[in-house]
Image: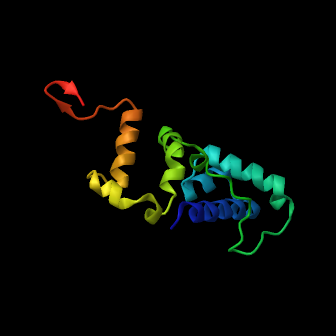
Amino acid sequence: MRQLTRRRLVDRKIVEYLVAGKSRRWIKKQLGVGGGRFEKVRAAAQAQGYLDGRTLPPYPEALFPDCSDRRAATRSGVDAMLRLHQPWISVPARRVGLATLDACGKSPHSLVCHSLTMAKGGHGKIENGKRM
């Protein structure tokens, strides 16, 4: 079961139990949710009017609008470095001239990885104690 589906199901159960008049302690114990989660759902249900007599939508429909996933909105440092190479990466392989890249013994993937490593302060090949 996906996390979003589970969240929707548990939210619905919390609201159904609240409408049925069950106690906070019983609902938390029955569903295994914490006090913070319970209070967020109770406040959202109160705001939507479900606790004041408004009927719940049919089962597959969500009770509340889905919150955005904050992890998807964050970008890593690697994304910023790849953005510099994006025009080159998005060019179809037939236009890049893979014969030229193959002649130097490097694949496009290895060239990008190498440039990213060097951009992050990584080290290249070392021969006789000197960085090449």
Question: In the rendered image of this protein, does residue 23 appear above or below residue 84?
Answer: below
Q: Is residue 122 left or right of residue 49?
A: left
Question: In the rendered image of this protein, does residue 5 appear above or below residue 101?
Answer: below
Residue 90 percent location from the top left of the image: 52, 57
Which residue is depicted at the point 13% across and 26% down? 128
Q: How many marks?
A: 0
Q: Residue furthest top?
A: 129
Q: Is residue 50 left or right of residue 39?
A: right
Which residue is depicted at the point 27% across and 34% down? 124
Question: In the rendered image of this protein, does residue 29 appear above or below residue 123?
Answer: below
Q: Residue furthest left?
A: 128
Relative depth, front residue between 17 and 96: 96
In the rendered image, which quarter is residue 57 located in? Answer: bottom right
Residue 64 percent location from the top left of the image: 74, 60
Which residue is depicted at the point 74% across and 75% down? 58
Question: In the rendered image of this protein, does residue 75 appear above or below residue 122?
Answer: below
Relative depth, front residue between 1 and 35: 1
Residue 45 percent location from the top left of the image: 77, 56
Relative depth, front residue between 16 and 73: 73
Q: Considering the image in quadrants, where does the C terminus appear? A: top left
Relative depth, front residue between 22 and 101: 101
Which residue is depicted at the point 53% across and 65% down? 2
Q: Is residue 92 left or right of residue 132?
A: right
Residue 19 percent location from the top left of the image: 76, 62
